[in-house]
Image: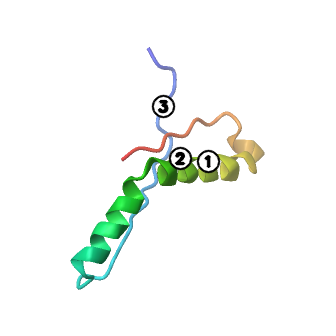
């Protein structure tokens, strides 16, 4: 049984204009779905959290 509890939750949203061309929407979706993009986002968040000593014991999870 896990001894961790959810303390806080943030949501990251990607907003585009309603009249964005379908081709552009597809390009954006492809980029967001790329494993390299998601890995870089994960690494960026980890690097950011490491700057704050108070968060040393916090485990973060990035999911879709």
Nearer-the-camera pick, 32 or 10? 32
Q: Residue at x 46, y 54 (%)?
A: 10
In the picture, which quadrant includes the N terminus?
top left
Residue that badge 1 annotates? 43
Residue that badge 2 annotates? 39
Dot label at residue 53 = none
Quadrant in the rendering for residue 11: bottom left
Q: Measured along the vertical axis of the image, is residue 3 above or below residue 54?
A: above
Q: Are marks 1 and 2 in contact (CB under 8 Å)?
A: yes
Q: Nearer the viewer, mark 3 or mark 2?
A: 2
Q: Are marks 3 and 2 in contact (CB under 8 Å)?
A: no
Q: Are marks 1 and 3 in contact (CB under 8 Å)?
A: no
The spot of residue 64 in percent (x, y) is 36, 47
User: Which structural element holds mark 3?
Assistant: loop
Nearer-the-camera pick, 27 or 14? 27
- Determine whether, in the image, residue 50 is placed left or right of residue 3: right
Neighbourhood count class around disc 2 (C-alpha, 10 Å): few under 14, some 14–19, many 20 upward: few
Q: Residue at x 22, y 76 (%)?
A: 22
Dot label at residue 5 = 3
> Which numbered disc flags the more N-terminal residue, 3 or 2?
3
User: Which structural element holds mark 1?
Assistant: helix
Q: Measured along the vertical axis of the image, is residue 64 above or below residue 15?
A: above
| Distance from Cα at disc 1 to Cα at disc 3 | 23 Å
């Amino acid at each position: 049984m896990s001894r961790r509890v959810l303390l806080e939750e943030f949501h990251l949203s990607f907003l585009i204009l309603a009249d964005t061309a379908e081709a552009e929407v597809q390009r954006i979706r492809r980029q967001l779905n790329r494993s390299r993009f998601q890995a870089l986002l994960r690494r960026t968040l980890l690097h950011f959290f490491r700057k704050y000593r108070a968060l040393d014991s916090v485990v973060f999870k990035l999911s879709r």
